[in-house]
Image: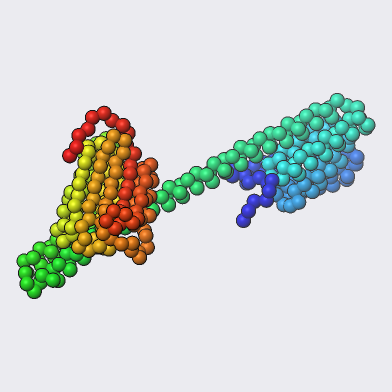
Amino acid sequence: MTRPTGAAQLAGFPAGWVRWLALGVFAALAGVGLLPLHPSPAAAAVAAVVAVAAAALLLAQRRPLLLSAVTATAGIAVLGYGTASNVGWFAVCLVAAWCALVARRSHALAYWAGMLVFFAVEWIWLDRDPGWGAWMAGTTLALAAGLLIRYQLDLVRQLREAQAGLAERARAEERNRIGRELHDVIAHTLTVTLLHISSARLAVEHDLADAARALAEAERLCRESLDEVRQVVGMLHPHAEPGTISPPGTISPPGTISPPGTISPPGTISPPGMAPLPSVDGLPALAERFRSAGANVILTVEGDVARLPATTGLAVYRIAQEALTNAVKHAPGAATVARLTVEAGAARLTVDSAAKPGTGTGLGMISMRERAESLGGQCEAGPGGSGWLVSATFPLAARSGGGAI
């Protein structure tokens, strides 16, 4: 349901008791204006009842609001009986303030202009009492105060909506990040496990020891994958210990829960049961895992990998993992060359294979590109090199010194 243009929405405002308080004040002012009993007791009583009833409709925001405001003001005008000294005119200021709060701005300004004309006519032609000028100023100040309060309330509402939008965006980004982690972990493990199972199937009739070794390796990979999946899924639970990593450079006491997604650099002490996320240090083991499954993978690392921040190291590992998995899947048996080069201002990862464009969903490509772009880098995948080339670049802060490994 959309809010009408120009209508105020009292966000976080205690409108319930405020309305009752405003109605009580209005009724008290109408009662004070009733005391002179002008123009007659019966007419004054009817005018007071009409004014309070119309004010109640106005405070309850029953439309049309401007008609209720004019009716309430007419009752007060009868009670005032053309006398500027009647305290009941304060009720007009209250009506002006409430119109500024709840009515359309154009209606509030129309009411204010009408009251200024009314008071001016009383002052100039009917009763040359300077008190009418005071009521004109009071009505103007009441309207201005109402508009100011309304502006502040609208600002609070907009800020809350913006905060809700940011929170939803953060939740969506976290879900996407966790989805990428799950995709990378499961896709890699299933591919390598399938290679081991295929090797075991071929070797079971000729070499039982080799088949047993392949099945044991497949079992180990599945267990590792389960641990990683539990770690990633644990990020979905704000108070769950699995899957949370200590923030960089901190030593976490036992039982401390760290923000999800932060990565501990080497040497960081994490609470019991929390495993660090992979980094570039795990690339040799990753390549060896593929080779043990029968894949022809060559890994070359050049430069000082210690310069890579933990977040960049995780992205490099995951992109290499996804690229190698795709290469083994689409070009089984073909040589795949992975090269990581750490230079002065950037880190570059390339994975070159004889694979041809596949017919998958492309989620892996999207994941690799998003990982690189989230760190200010870029990742491209397409025909090139020996057949299919994945190239990722990450910017690095300049630092003097550094050797090759």
- Give the x, y percent position of residue 131: 84, 27
Which residue: 10% across, 63% down?
213
Task: State whether residue 47 appears in this view.
Answer: yes
Which residue: 76% across, 51% down?
64
- Give the x, y percent position of residue 404: 19, 37
Residue 255 falls left or right of residue 110: left
Residue located farthest toward the bottom when viewing the structure as drawn: 205
The coloring applied to the image is rainbow
> Is 182 situated above or below 402?
below
Q: Nearer the viewer, residue 339 or 228?
A: 339
Which image quarter is the N terminus in?
bottom right
**Quadrant assignment, res 322:** bottom left
> Is 365 situated above or below 346?
below
Residue 3 falls left or right of residue 119: left
Which residue: 6% across, 72% down?
206
**Quadrant assignment, res 132:** top right
Which image quarter is the C terminus in?
top left
> Is 52 situated above or below 358?
above
Q: Nearer the viewer, residue 100 or 35?
A: 100
**Quadrant assignment, res 34:** top right
Residue 236 falls left or right of residue 149: left
User: How many numbered callouts?
Assistant: 0
Which residue: 24% across, 47% down?
339
Residue 397 falls left or right of residue 71: left
Task: State whether residue 236 appears in this view.
Answer: no
> Is 343 situated above or below 282?
above
Q: Nearer the viewer, residue 143 or 176?
A: 176
Residue located farthest toward the top when viewing the structure as drawn: 130
- Give the x, y percent position of residue 222: 20, 61
